[in-house]
Image (spheres, rainbow, N blue to C red):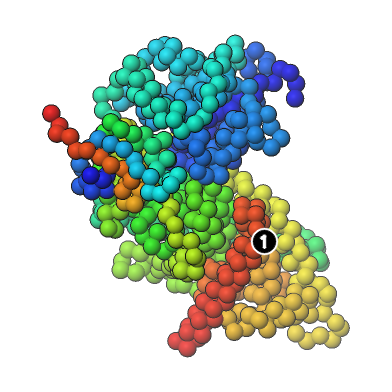
Amino acid sequence: MTASTLRIALVGNPNCGKTALFNQLTGGRQKVANYAGVTVERKEGRFTAPSGRVLQVLDLPGTYSFDVTSPDEQITRDVLEGNYPGESAPDLIVCVADATNLRLHLRFVLEVKRLGRPMVLALNMMDAAARRGIRIDVPELSRRLGMPVVETVAVKREGVKALMARVDGEMPEAAQAQADDAASRSGLHAQVRELMAATVTMPRATAELDDALDRWALHPVFGLAILSLVMFLVFQAVYAAGKPMTDLIGDGFGWLGDHATAWMPAGPLQSLIVDGLFGGLGTVIGFLPEILVLFFFILVLEESGYLPRAAFLLDRWMVSVGLTGRSFIPLLSSFACAIPGIMGTRSITDPRDRLATILVAPLMTCSARLPVYALLIGAFIPTRRVWGVFNMQGLVLFALYAAGVIGAMAVAWVMKKMRRDRSEHALLMELPSYRLPKLRDVAIGLYERGMIFLKRLTGIILGLTILMWFLSSFPAPPAGATGPAIDYSAAGYIGRGLQVIFAPLGFNWQICVSLIPAFAARETAVAALATVYAVGGEGADGAGLAQALAANFSLASALSLMVWFAFAPQCMSTLAVIRRETDSWRNVGISFGYMFAVAYVASFVTYQITSLLT
Amino acid sequence: MRLSDLPKGATAVVDRVDDAHASDPIAQRLRDLGFVAGEPVRVAAMGPMGADPLLIQIGSTRFALRRKEADRVLVRVEAVA
């Protein structure tokens, strides 16, 4: 590190806009959303100030107080006090406070001030404060606090100029350090009240819009009705909006495959390109639209401030099954992917609630399972209308998601019954102001997710697909063989070996083979099935694969496979995250073991019952 | 009276927060969040099941508290002039 690098830390109460400021300052693309606890890790970025100096910026998890109650708050405290491993205390602290919520946020500002380090206060969301008629005497506030105060609007590019100039300028003088003890801390509120009385006038304590919306959103009856409707519409939309685009992409790759077949000489290379790449990868990429539609809704919900309301409505119910209202947001993120979901549990204060949430999070249907469901539903479930409005395929998809949720509740309930610790754990959750989602943030979020998907596709999924093609194509059948060539390949042997275990679930050997790469990345199951059937001579693109599946296995097998994916052990990366977040191989074992057992039993029952009925 | 005894929509002023047991972190966090003597509070909403949790507005902030947490907060109902 050069002498001219200034290290700045952004701190403040949860959901005051630290990460939005960080993104504006550094040009970063860290995730922002409208609820407390989005940032659970220390994030680092840098920018070059007008003076040419390089500034290193740390974005820290929000915290209400130095009397920490959760792992993410601990990180913030450690960094500020210079106790974070491998890092000295920052040169300058930028304390961020929401200008519409100063009564709460100023207390933490005063607490940070007692560290006795150079510090700047950024009054964020000044635009929202102005709209609500809140007037702040900034020079007076600055004088009384004894630190520079800068107004910011973190969601606008122009809104951080003053802050940028301020941190690039002369280093503010530090206040005198004060001991941190309960007695002096209890005096902070009185100081805040004094500051508020002298510098802030507000016509109304809360935004009228929030009160009006909450009357509906938190209503005991309408609130629950709205929540169910929102969730249901999201999953209907995934199918209704995503499917036509998926079909289009599938057709495109089918066309490419046909042309490649026509142009290339027959042989292993043609087979690799047509069957492996266009057939396998093309099928997976076709599901990108569905994934993006799902993410669009999750991002909009996150930005709006509605999610903590949902957590409020569901808290009592979640407690009764052994979770907490706070579990709701990590569990909802797990519909995108269990990995950010499990990391998001860091904002759950209580270790017991947190572990329960981590263990059930993978039961939420992640977006990687969507291609598998979409393929099987498309192949086996008729597209008819139910009660005139709902799409039958959408309903089955909803049922699969519901199965994951109900399974998670059941598992959490069993864990609750098994544990001995019955001490009390707090909810204490702040409900933020509603906010209109910013098109730019949603677009960035979608872009990031889309890129992650494409990187997986060109990395691990591509690699596994080529491997699957190889296993399905070699060794070549012996001279004089009568059956299809693929029966003599390595994939054929492996699949038939596994079939011993999975036959009671109605899985044929092709399905068994596809389960192996699915353990690395779920979507690969689709690519693997596509490759196996393509090499076997049936169908390459998405639509062709659906026909090949419909011809090769029964409705009972298809339903059984969908149920398997609803509960089956999560992918390797999820297990790795569980290991990292809980620091325990035992939890990894529990997680893998119970999911395998539940999936096996559920698929077995599904297959046997459906076989009897059809 | 306790914060958890207030009906929906009622306002009151915080008197103090009691520790439910020795060195109660939940009580400490409530104090840090501004539940200190003299602060006006309002019960803004109640959850759909068993009227739990409570949505408490204190200052400009809305906190969701379970009844057990709100039990720790003692309040006075003052006649509004």
* In the image: residue A278, left or right of residue A356: right
* In the image: residue A185, left or right of residue A571: left
Residue B21 placed where, x, y %?
Answer: 41, 49
Q: Quadrant of the N terminus of chain A?
A: top right
Instruction: Report the amino acid beneath label 1.
Output: Trp
Q: Nearer the viewer, residue A263 or A466?
A: A466
Residue A123 placed where, x, y %?
Answer: 44, 23
Q: Quadrant of residue A470?
A: bottom right
Q: Nearer the viewer, residue A392 or A418?
A: A418
In this view, the residue farthest toward the bottom is A612
Q: Quadrant of residue A599?
A: bottom right
Q: Would residue A259 be visible to someone looking at this image? A: no
Residue B68 placed where, x, y %?
Answer: 34, 52
Please state the total of marks drawn on the protein image: 1
> How many C-alpha atoms fall within 10 Å of the one at disc 1: few (<14), some, or many (≥20)?
some
Q: Which residue is mark 1?
A: A585
Residue sitting at 27 percent across and 48 percent down?
B4
> Which chain does the residue under circle 1 lie in?
A
Vertically, is A516 above or below B39?
Answer: below
Residue sitting at 49 percent across and 48 percent down?
A349
Residue sitting at 31 percent across and 19 percent down?
A197
